[in-house]
Image (cartoon, rainbow, N blue to C red):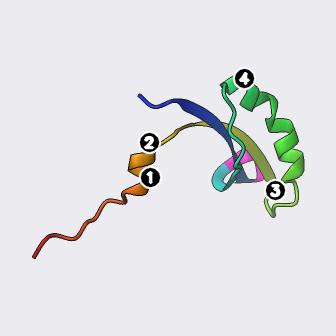
Amino acid sequence: MEPAFFVIAILGCADGGTACTPVTTLQTHYATEAQCTAATGAALIDNSKLDFPTLIASCKRGETKSADAQERPKDKRRPG
């Protein structure tokens, strides 16, 4: 299993925090969910100009891909 990290996803929501849509995912990686959660308040302030009635910051788990997997995109073509 690859090492994991956490990122903050900003969601834009209709009034009352319903019907949320992912707006952006911040590039900063956090080693733990607690570190990520602690940074959500500042992330909301930094992204407060997004055009939604309600914004929510949520920590999402990400996994790094091996260098080999990143360098070799899957070729969907079949030999012909």
Question: Residue shown at 45%/31% (left/top)?
Answer: 2
Q: Amino acid at mark 1?
A: Gln
Mark in the foreground, 4 or 3: 4
Residue 25, how many percent across, how many down? 67, 51
Q: Which residue is mark 2?
A: 66
Which range of residues does the magenta coloring cover? Answer: 14-18
Residue type beneath disc 2? Ser
Q: CA distance from mark 3 to mark 2?
A: 39 Å
* Mark 2 vs 4, N-terminal side: 4
The image shows residue 66, relative to residue 33, as above or below, that is below
Quadrant (top left/top right/bottom left/bottom right) for the C terminus:
bottom left
Residue that appears at 45% across and 46% down: 67
The circle drawn on residue 70 is: 1
Question: Type of residue at label 3?
Answer: Pro
Give the vertical position of 29 relative to 37 (above or below).
below
Q: What type is the residue that disc 4 sits on?
A: Ala
Spatial separation of the CA atoms under disc 1 and disc 4: 28 Å
The quarter of the picture where the N terminus appears is top left
Give the mark nearer the N terminus: 3 vs 2: 3
SS type, badge 2: loop
- Which is in the foreground here, disc 3 or disc 2? 2
The answer to whether the residues at label 2 and label 1 have Cβ atoms under 8 Å apart is: yes
Observer-nearest of 12 and 17: 12
Dot 1 falls on a residue whose secondary structure is helix
In terms of sequence position, does the residue under pointer 1 or pointer 3 come before the other? 3
